[in-house]
Amino acid sequence: MSRRQLAMVMDLNKCIGCQTCTVACKTQWTNRDGREYMYWNNVETRPGSGYPKKWEDMGGGFDAKGNLQEGEVPNRRTGYGVPWDYNHDEIMSGATFEPSADPKWGPNWDEDVGGGMFPNSHHFYLPRICNHCSNPACMAACNNQAIFKRDQDGVVLVDMDRCQGERQCIAACPYKKIYFNARLSKSEKCIMCFPRIEKGLPPACAQQCVGRIRFVGFMDDEEGQVHKLVNKYKVALPLHPEYGTQPNVFYVPPLPGPETFDDEGKPIPNSKRIPVELLEHLFGPEVTRVQAVLEGEIQKKKRGERSDILDILIAYKHSEMFRIDSAVPMGEQHGQSTAPAPVKAPTKLAITRVPAASLSLGKVRRS
Ligand code: SF4
Ligand code: SF4
């Protein structure tokens, strides 16, 4: 366990599947040097197979007694898919628009396919990053003690000097959120944008989020919105808590959606468009309780009453959504009341060096 734990809450009722978070992460960290196929942040459609394909069937994590479970390393070609581009430059000379490869799978390959039949079809989006778990299976599985949690914020990192590329971590992570860099022969993963965190700024995926679905803060910051959503109001749930890794990314589950229609096209009263079984599969048995709480809060608002939960979820101010330093809300750190200061993009040198050289830079302390 780390001294403090940084966490993220994502409100799935507001995710529009725009992939801005994915692009923010990819352009900053994973668009070169053997990381091209990696998506430290991905947004998948549910119901769906996810990324990598069928990751929930690949094992890993811990059993109820705390024993590490066997897991698989996803296949590069069939699990992740081969990155491809399009022949943009040839279009003007009359070529047909075509991909540069013959893709069979990729991130959010099953975008918007969802489940059910018209007019009762349904889908929602599930954004995923490394959960920076309190009990990381990746760390437990590593024979070389190359994975560690930072004491000051619980961020889980790979020590590139120690990593031998043996991939036990990838097999052990039940979320498949750690990747093999074949060019470096090392494992790499989401770093929670720790160079930004150290400046009091949220991860790029959270700051860029168009739907303002992401809240970032310390779990022990009782004034923070993350603490309130997870611990006080208990409306944010971990993904697959049964995996035993104690994730620190939490989700406000989606509401059931509009009523379903019968064969004559009439709405069925109190029917649920998104099956509760699907949501319980992802977030456990608390889903129905959370949905009831949220419905109750919506009714309060409709009656003109105050709802602290909805006022948080509406996400009025970045300065309240992101409390990286629990003593000082982020906007105030930069002399602002509502929005964070613009961030200068890291240089290419910094991008490529941070994961590999963070220890030698003296920025990261092992716990
Ligand atoms: S999600 Fe996977 S890679 Fe991330 S800390 Fe947990 S076990 Fe490790
Ligand atoms: S940027 Fe926000 S709204 Fe868009 S896909 Fe990512 S999490 Fe969803």
Image: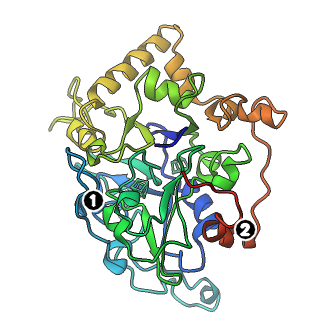
Q: Quadrant of residue 73?
A: bottom left
Residue 362: x and y in percent read 70, 60
Q: Please state if 167 lies on the left or on the right of 89 as rendered.
A: left
Mark 1 crowdedness (10 Å alpha carbons): few <14, some 14-19, many ≥20: many
Q: Quadrant of ligand 1?
A: bottom left
Which quadrant is home to the N terminus? top left
Residue 142: x and y in percent read 39, 65
- The answer to which of 70 and 66 lies nearer the viewer is 66
Q: What residue sits 64% from the left and 64% below the top?
A: 359
The residue under label 2 is 350
Residue 196: x and y in percent read 69, 51
Ligand 1 within 8 Å of disc 1? The answer is: yes
Above or below, comparing residue 300 to residue 127 in the picture: above
Q: Please state if 213 lies on the left or on the right of 178 as rendered.
A: right
Residue 189 visible in the current orientation:
yes
Q: What residue sits 59% from the left and 60% below the top?
A: 25
Q: Quadrant of residue 22?
A: bottom right
Amino acid at pointer 2: Ala
Q: What residue sits 40% from the left and 49% below the top?
A: 126
Q: What residue sits 64% from the left and 49% below the top?
A: 208
| Element at label 1 | loop
- The answer to which of 182 and 318 lies nearer the viewer is 182
Residue 52 visible in the current orientation:
no
The residue under label 1 is 60
Above or below, comparing residue 290 to residue 262 in the picture: above
Q: Earlier in the sequence, mark 2 or mark 1?
A: 1
Residue 16: x and y in percent read 49, 46
Mark 2 crowdedness (10 Å alpha carbons): few <14, some 14-19, many ≥20: some
